[in-house]
Image (spheres, rainbow, N blue to C red):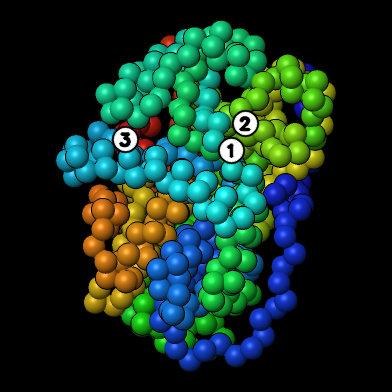
Amino acid sequence: MSVTGPSAGTGPLWWDDAAPRPPADTSPLPLSVDVAVVGGGYTGLWTAYYLLRTRPDLTVLVLEAEHVGFGASGRNGGWVSALWPVSPDVLARRYGRAAASAQLAALRDTVDEVGRVDEAEGLGSGFTKGGALVVARSAAQVVRARAEAEHAASWRMGTTWLTSEAARERLDAPGVLGATYTPDCARIHPRRLVDGLGALVRRMGARVVEGVRVARAGDGVVVLRDGRRVSAASVVLGTEGWTPSFPGHERSVVPVYSLMVATEPLSDEVWAGLGLAGREVFADHGHLVVYGQRTDDGRIAFGGRGAPYHWGSTVRPEFDHEGQVFAALRAHLLGVLPQLDGVGFTHAWGGALGIARDWHPSVRWDASTRTGWAGGYVGDGVAATNLAGRTLADLVLGRSSPLTALPWVGHRSPRWEPEPLRWLGVNAGLRAAHLADLEEARTGRPARLGALLSRLTAH
């Protein structure tokens, strides 16, 4: 098996053909605005979009430390999914079955909403709703996959079990024993979506200022690190993996790195043999999360977890690159699709995502300080950020709606433990997922660690 590719890392594949950045905005910042949004990723930009679509008279200021799409929004695997990191059973125990069902239905609707806006506004993300195929590659994975399909049926989630033959009609992965298929998922080019949103909200009247670092935000004011201040009637934080850098949020979420690799463009003949003709995204039922898609230019972009958590919830550019993880991802992809043996890999990159202590994404709004926050998406944020943006817009505008009644609104996750417990716990969880997969490969039976991982990850 030949596995070659960059070990030191490159820039994200999605950035190769990113839209030209607008000229730097060097004019003075306003003294006051109606809404200040901190973070130029999906959460902040969707919030700005839905605010201005409803109230075009609002003054909206978006502040971004680097450039639009610098974080997870411009680096991710491009799954617009109705997947949710918290089991519906957990949601039902906390909030009731009706509330849990409403959350799941809102996520399914959100996949279509992203596609609707992409088409209506000409965002150019390449949105294609081909569904998600998750293959089972061992007897233990078959047990887990069948149970997932049965559980999904009890919640009317649309996930079905496919036989080996049916699975291979979609993706010709030798040795696959079956798969689950979920229709409520689309693929996009992540950077094109975020760049399109950034340009759109500018056209709608928002001011988007890049390259400015915020020291503190909330309670009617945004303070930049250079001392400048902007008063705001409302403040929204869309900072995801960078949230721990803000005072008072140090233990709200942990930044966990997900890394990706990409192949060279594959020929039409290779694709005719591989499949994914409907642009399905794909993964497997292992414990360690992986995810892949067929890109617009005929590559496979493939990612997964496994990179270590860094002490103190630190996020740094050098953490985007872990040579051993890149090598493991290439090997994993060739394990699923051995037909790719000898194919070159051209890109390797990574980025941080946010995870709350109970793995429960949330939208929060403090009416007394008029400060909102959304995040902790656990890597399922491409759709969830749109739902968050619509919800935050309603909350800022003081509107009660079905969205503001969803159970993730106002949810309070426990704080993460202080160091060194946080470092030990997060990295132990990542290691346990790896060991569980090794145990299942060796024994062919569901890993004993699986039950522990389910408890740790709110399943």
- SS under mark 1: loop
Residue 123, image x, y percentages: 61, 55
**Mark 2 near mark 1, Cβ–Cβ under 8 Å?**
yes
Where residue 279 is drawn, which disc sits there?
Answer: 2
Residue drawn at x 27%, y 24% is 154
- Residue at label 1? 128
Residue drawn at x 79%, y 25% is 268
Residue drawn at x 62%, y 31% is 279
Q: Is residue 331 left or right of residue 377?
A: right
Q: In this view, does 356 lie above or below 221?
A: above
Amino acid type of the residue tagged 1 in the rendering: Thr
Q: Is residue 111 left or right of residue 402?
A: right
Q: In this view, does 182 lie to the left or right of 64?
A: left
Label 3 environment density (alpha carbons within 10 Å; few <14, some 14–19, many ≥20): some
Q: In this view, does 174 lie above or below 424?
A: above
- Mark in the foreground, 3 or 1: 1
Along the polypeptide, which appears first: circle 3 or circle 1?
A: 3
Label 1 environment density (alpha carbons within 10 Å; few <14, some 14–19, many ≥20): some
In this view of the protein, can residue 47 be seen by the observer? no
- SS under mark 2: loop
Along the polypeptide, which appears first: circle 2 or circle 1?
A: 1
Report the front residue among 19 and 72. Answer: 19
Report the front residue among 152 and 411. Answer: 152
Amino acid type of the residue tagged 3 in the rendering: Ser
Residue 215, image x, y percentages: 49, 78
The quadrant of the image that shows the N terminus is top right
Q: In this view, does 315 lie to the left or right of 328?
A: left
- Residue at label 3? 87
Residue 114, image x, y percentages: 50, 49
Q: Distance between the residues labelled 2 and 1?
A: 7 Å
- Mark in the foreground, 2 or 3: 2
Amino acid type of the residue tagged 2 in the rendering: Arg
